[in-house]
Image (spheres, grey):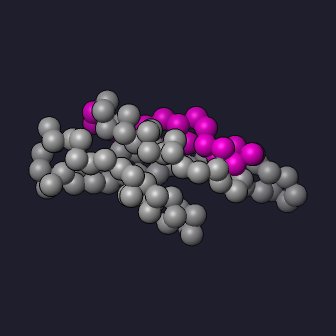
Amino acid sequence: QCMSSKIGVFINKRFRSDEFNNLKKNDTHKIYVKFKIDAQGNITEVIARAQQKDMEEEGIRVVRKLPKMTPGRMGDINVPVSYLVPISFKVE
C-alpha cells in the first residue's frame, strides 16, 4: 500500500491535466494505466484505457517516467508484478 501511495504522489506531480481543455469542466475524468515492474525493477508493458487517445498517451507518458523500482519477491527470487493505476483528474 505504501508503494501505491508513492506511485500516486509521483503521478499527481507530473500529470498534465491542463492539456485537456476540450473536456467538460469540473467533471472527474479517469485513465486506467496497466504496467509491469519486471524482475529487474524496470517499468514495462505500459498500456492505458481512457475516453480519448490523448488521455491514454498522457497516462502512458507519466507512468513511463516512474523511477526504477524494487522488484517483487517470491522467496529469494525477484519476480515481475503487474499493476493497474487509476488516474482521476478534473479540468479547471
Residue depicted at x 54% and y 49%: 66
State yes or no: residue 41 in magenta. yes
The span shown in magenta is: 34-52
State yes or no: residue 81 in magenta. no
Quadrant housing residue 32: top left
33 on left or right of 1: left
Whether 41 is drawn above or below 61: the answer is below
The residue sitting at the bottom extreme is 2
**Image location (x, y in percent) of residue 73:** 77, 57
**Image location (x, y in percent) of residue 71:** 72, 53
The residue sitting at the top extreme is 53
Residue in front for this viewpoint, 60 or 51: 60
Quarter in which the C terminus is drawn: bottom left
Residue 81 shows in this picture: no
86 on left or right of 91: right
Residue depicted at x 39% and y 52%: 14
Whether 5 is drawn above or below 38: the answer is below
Residue depicted at x 80% and y 51%: 78
**Image location (x, y in percent) of residue 91:** 18, 51
Quadrant housing residue 74: bottom right
Residue depicted at x 85% and y 59%: 75
**Image location (x, y in percent) of residue 47:** 48, 35
The residue sitting at the left extreme is 25
The residue sitting at the right extreme is 76
Whether 34 is drawn above or below 69: the answer is above
Residue 48 shows in this picture: yes
71 on left or right of 26: right
Quarter in which the N terminus is drawn: bottom right
- State the count of labels: 0
